[in-house]
């Protein structure tokens, strides 16, 4: 964060801070509080701090940026867009501001405009891994997968320790149906962020997609232990438990035995041989076909792109140019 001297002379937005040093100190105190509150998931409290800073200096970009950040965290994206526009009016050369606006526009499904903002961030900071990360996510939402993969690879060249960028690569590869490579990217993300629920959930999804059922279940249990309210992992577990397995085999055998018993009662031993066995074979074949063609819930799972909460987390590290 800026020093006290920076607060009382020229701000990061390039505009003069209003008032004396005490007013400047109060302004930056609210900004620091807002940033800390967003990082801990208390976006509503962060918004109050950002608005207090705006009241002290409505012409300064930083307060508007933080207000937009907090509003984006709670999905108030139309309001967030208005606030980020105020911030960029005061500080148009902010790569972070353009990345945040791109994220907000993506949430509003205005992907072409989001791409323009991501490109502007890249123009302002052409060697920033964060600009390439945001650019890749925007391309993914436009289904320009190969370009997205090139962009995220560049982000990882510049910052290979970013769990968020590895997870973005996981999403891109999964959308390209490169499941094994997607799993490798998810494993890289979890190695860097072993306690993050989003990383655990996405690793579990990759394992499930590869039919590595027991490993997926173990990861989902770990995710739920980390966050007992984790609805995503609970639903995935339910889907996996509902898969046909031993229960289906038991059902097939029971049906065959009942059919054979009915036929033998009606036609005796000859009826069992002439009708029962062919009927049993047909039933077994029917269940085999059903088991192979039954829709797998995992095949209908959407590939999780980095969501708003995760994107908000990346904004903290993306404060750099």
Image: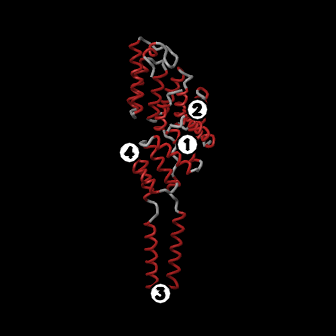
**Marked residue nearer the N-terminal end (2 or 3):** 2
Answer yes or no: do the residues labelled 2 and 3 have beta carbons within 8 Å? no
Kindly report the distance in space between the C-alpha atoms of the residues bearing marks 3 and 4.
Answer: 61 Å
- Left or right side of 53 for 138: right
**Marked residue nearer the N-terminal end (3 or 1):** 1
Q: Residue lying farthest top?
A: 20
**Marked residue nearer the N-terminal end (1 or 4):** 1
Picture quadrant where residue 117 is located: top right
* Label 3 secondary element: helix
Kindly report the distance in space between the C-alpha atoms of the residues bearing marks 2 and 3.
Answer: 76 Å
Answer yes or no: do the residues labelled 3 and 1 have beta carbons within 8 Å? no
Which residue does the numbered mark 3 point to in the structure image?
A: 267
**Marked residue nearer the N-terminal end (3 or 4):** 4
The correct choice, above or below, for 126 with respect to 11 in the image is: below
Nearer mark to the viewer, of 1 and 2: 1
Query: Are there few (<14), some (14-19), or many (20+) residues within 10 Å of tag 1?
Result: many
Answer yes or no: do the residues labelled 1 and 2 have beta carbons within 8 Å? no
Which residue does the numbered mark 1 point to in the structure image?
A: 169
**Marked residue nearer the N-terminal end (1 or 2):** 2
Residue 118 tag number: 2
Residue 226 tag number: 4
Kindly report the distance in space between the C-alpha atoms of the residues bearing marks 1 and 2.
Answer: 17 Å
Residue 120 on image: x %, y %: 60, 28
Residue drawn at (44%, 77%) of the image: 257
Tell me which colouring the rendered structure shows.
secondary structure
The correct choice, above or below, for 282 with respect to 151 in the image is: below
* Label 4 secondary element: helix
The correct choice, above or below, for 263 with respect to 182 in the image is: below
Between 257 and 154, the one lying in front of the other is 154
Kindly report the distance in space between the C-alpha atoms of the residues bearing marks 2 and 4.
Answer: 33 Å
């Amino acid at each position: 964060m800026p020093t006290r001297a920076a607060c009382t002379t020229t701000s990061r937005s390039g505009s003069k801070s209003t008032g004396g040093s005490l007013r400047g100190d109060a302004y930056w105190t609210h900004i620091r509080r807002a940033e800390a509150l967003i990082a801990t998931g208390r976006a509503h409290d962060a918004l109050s701090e950002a608005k207090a800073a705006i009241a002290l200096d409505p012409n300064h970009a930083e307060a508007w940026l933080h207000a937009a950040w907090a509003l984006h965290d709670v999905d108030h994206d139309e309001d967030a867009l208005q606030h980020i526009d105020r911030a960029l009016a005061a500080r148009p050369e902010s790569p972070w501001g353009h990345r945040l606006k791109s994220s907000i526009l993506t949430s509003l499904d205005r992907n072409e405009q989001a791409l323009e903002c991501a490109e502007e961030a890249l123009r302002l900071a052409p060697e920033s891994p964060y600009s390439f990360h945001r650019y890749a996510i925007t391309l993914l939402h436009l289904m320009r997968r190969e370009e997205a993969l090139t962009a995220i690879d560049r982000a990882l060249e510049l910052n290979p320790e970013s769990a968020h960028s590895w997870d973005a690569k996981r999403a891109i590869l999964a959308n390209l149906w490169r499941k094994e490579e997607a799993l490798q990217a998810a494993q890289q993300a979890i190695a860097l962020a072993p306690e993050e629920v989003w990383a655990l959930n996405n690793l579990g999804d990759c394992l499930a997609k590869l039919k590595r059922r027991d490993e997926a279940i173990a990861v989902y249990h770990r995710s739920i232990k980390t966050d007992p309210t984790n609805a995503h992992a609970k639903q995935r577990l339910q889907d996996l438990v509902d898969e046909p397995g031993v229960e289906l085999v038991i059902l097939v055998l029971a049906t065959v035995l009942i059919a054979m018993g009915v036929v033998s009662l009606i036609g005796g031993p000859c009826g069992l041989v002439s009708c029962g066995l062919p009927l049993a074979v047909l039933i077994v074949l029917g269940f085999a076909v059903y088991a192979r063609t039954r829709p797998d819930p995992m095949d209908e799972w959407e590939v999780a792109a980095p969501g708003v909460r995760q994107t908000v987390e990346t904004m903290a590290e993306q404060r750099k140019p």
